Image: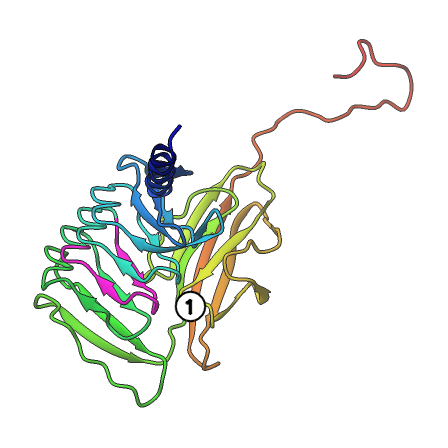
Amino acid sequence: MTTLTRAFCAVLAALCGMVSSLSAAKFGNFDYIDNGTSITITGYPTDLVQDIVIPSTINGKPVTSIGASAFSGCNGPNSIQIPSSVTSIGNSAFSGCNGLTSVTIPSSVTSIGDYAFAGCSILKSARFMGHAPSMGGPSVFYSTRSGFAVYYFNFNAGTSFTSPFWHGYASVSVSGAPADLANLTLGSGTLSPVFDQATTTYSVSVLHAVSSITVTPTTLTDVASVSVNESPVTSGSASGAIPLNVGSNTITTVVTAQDGTTIATYTLTVTRAPSAVSTLSGLALSSGTLSPTFA
């Protein structure tokens, strides 16, 4: 093999390695591209009916961007959690997500492409946890529901906020960190109604066989604290097992903002069904022997 041929093969191998590193791959339900030092989410099944929690890292590399149309047309999720590792959201990234009721944009996000949340027909609000990022155009939230509002949470006293063009929707500046949940899940049963940040009262019915339940609250910000039935819980982690009596049981989740005074209370009523068992577990006599043996 000539020196020129060997050099050509070396260059070709290097190019193949670059193409391989940028090729699409799978992580759970997520399609992604490895950029070398960071990850871009590029796709997700449109027919998967469950809330979406985007990972902050894949294979030890930070997820820094949501690609164009990555979640477009996802009909199932009520909520989508965007990690604080993400800095950019591409054009039409979440367009047409018709189950989405609210979205929280972490302060790490510096740019959002046009039509990123367009056509999310029941989207009630967008909450920005930092200064508004640059927008790809005026139609980021185009065709959302009537009454849609944008909230900006100002963590730093004295800083200013310049609202971008929200396509005619209301923009509300809120001082201080919010005392809200981003999600609330249960160890058993299904919340009714489905979780929404603006809804603070829920119910769930469980079978008699379910004698205890756990609650997993996830706070909107990592500087808020949370407790379940007055016991502190780590955001995103399950509470201890809470015993359930037959009938109605009230479980209270309290979120306290960083300022220590702003509080949000979420109330869950768990109804445990009565026992449907009408058999004996044992039968004993003071004299004689049962025939046949008790069963």
Q: Residue at x 34, y 67 (%)?
A: 108
Residue closest to the eye, 16 or 154: 16
Q: Is residue 210 above or below residue 270?
A: above
Q: Position of residue 160 (x, y in %)?
A: 25, 85
Which quadrant of the structure image shows residue 266? bottom left
- How was the colour assigned to the protein in this rendering? rainbow
The residue at the point 77 percent across, 25 percent down is 282
Place of residue 274 in the rendered image (x, y in percent of width and height, measured from the top left) = 55, 38
> Residue placed at 24% from the left, 41% from the top?
75
Image quarter (top left, top right, bottom left or bottom right) of the N terminus: top left
The quadrant in which residue 227 appears is bottom right
Is residue 273 visible from the viewing direction of this image?
A: yes
Residue under numbered circle 1: 221
Query: In screen coordinates, is 177 left or right of 206?
Result: left
Q: Position of residue 99 (x, y in %)?
A: 25, 47
Residues shaded magenta: 100-116
Q: Is residue 83 above or below residue 70?
A: below
SS assignment for the magenta stretch, majority: loop
